[in-house]
């Protein structure tokens, strides 16, 4: 049985990751802040802030999933510092780090010189978030000392969308389904993330997922 740690497990995506991992029979430990709660009774809970986690806290796990999210102007830079902290305490170990990523850094041309966030149609309100998450990914790519995987969702990432159990996988480039849509629910995203634990197809790679 794989031992999985989920950091920031009480958030909307974290909660779905917990439920999916528990349903597969994994030994799941949720790391949350003091005011956060994890509803799944089959998961263990440790109250500790991400930035207070140590190498010893994560020792013994097979996989750590980073479900950190920040949304305000003041906290957006934490996407970089939080990911660096997790990388530093996992450095040189065999523990995999799976990161809940963003779609804004996906490429829209074969040369990989233009990203979704660079397009005129990309909403201004999301550009600071996409920029910070993209910078965090750029730094992650340089971490050859960590077994990282970064999963970018569809452009339309639906918190309360249906769990269909079906999805399409891509790579570094933005793509759409047969309906011309780039859309996925948090629940289906969680399925793809936990499937990656089992398949291990994207170590030290970024890949992407959309719904059928």
Image (cartoon, grey):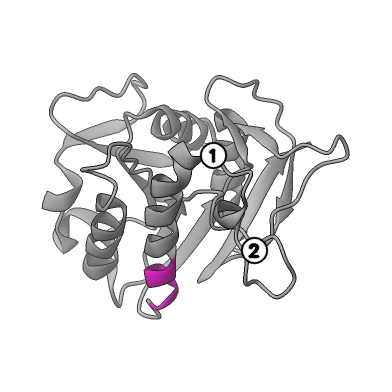
Label 1 and label 2: CA atoms lie apart by 21 Å
* Residue depicted at x 54% and y 39%: 123
Residue depth check, mark 1 versus mark 2: number of the one nearer the observer: 1
State the image quarter where residue 115 is shown. bottom right
In this rendering, position of residue 20 left or right of residue 89: right
- Check residue 55 for magenta coloring: no
Q: Is residue 1 visible?
A: no
Percent coordinates x, y for residue 36 in the rendering: 22, 25
Q: Label 2's element?
A: loop
Segment tinted magenta in the rendering: 138-142
Percent coordinates x, y for residue 199 in the rendering: 62, 58
Toward the viewer: 47 or 43? 47
Q: Return the mark for residue 172.
A: 2
Percent coordinates x, y for residue 91 in the rendering: 28, 73
Q: Is residue 145 above or below residue 189?
A: below
Determine crowd level at label 1: few under 14, some 14-19, many 20+ residues with C-alpha closer than 10 A: few
State the image quarter where residue 81 is shown. bottom left
Is there CB contact under 8 Å for labels 1 and 2? no
Q: Earlier in the sequence, mark 1 or mark 2?
A: 1
Determine crowd level at label 2: few under 14, some 14-19, many 20+ residues with C-alpha closer than 10 A: many
* Residue depicted at x 26% and y 53%: 77
Quarter holding the C terminus is top right
Percent coordinates x, y for residue 158 in the rendering: 58, 27
Q: Which residue is mark 1?
A: 123
Toward the viewer: 77 or 94? 77
In this rendering, position of residue 170 left or right of residue 87: right
In this rendering, position of residue 152 left or right of residue 82: right
The secondary structure making up most of the magenta span is: helix
Q: Is residue 9 above or below residue 64?
A: above
Residue at the far right: name it.
178
């Amino acid at each position: 049985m794989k031992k999985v740690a989920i950091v920031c497990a009480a958030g909307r995506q974290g909660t779905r990751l917990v439920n999916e991992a528990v349903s597969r029979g994994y030994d799941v430990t949720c790391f949350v802040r003091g005011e956060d709660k994890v509803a799944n009774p089959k998961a263990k809970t440790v109250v500790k802030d991400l930035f207070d986690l140590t190498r010893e806290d994560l020792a013994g796990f097979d996989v750590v999933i980073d479900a950190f999210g920040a949304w305000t102007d003041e906290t957006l830079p934490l996407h970089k510092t939080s990911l660096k902290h997790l990388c530093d305490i996992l450095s040189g170990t065999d523990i995999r780090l799976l990161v809940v990523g963003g779609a804004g850094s996906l490429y829209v041309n074969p040369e990989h010189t233009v990203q979704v966030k660079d397009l005129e149609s990309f909403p201004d309100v999301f550009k600071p978030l996409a920029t910070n998450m993209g910078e965090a990914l750029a730094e992650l790519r340089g971490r050859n000392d960590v077994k990282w995987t970064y999963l970018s969702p569809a452009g339309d990432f639906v918190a309360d969308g249906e769990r269909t159990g079906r999805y399409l996988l891509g790579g570094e480039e933005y793509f759409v389904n047969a309906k011309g849509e780039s859309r996925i629910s948090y629940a289906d995203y969680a399925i793809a993330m936990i499937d990656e634990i089992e398949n291990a197809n994207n170590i030290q790679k970024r890949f992407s997922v959309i719904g059928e």
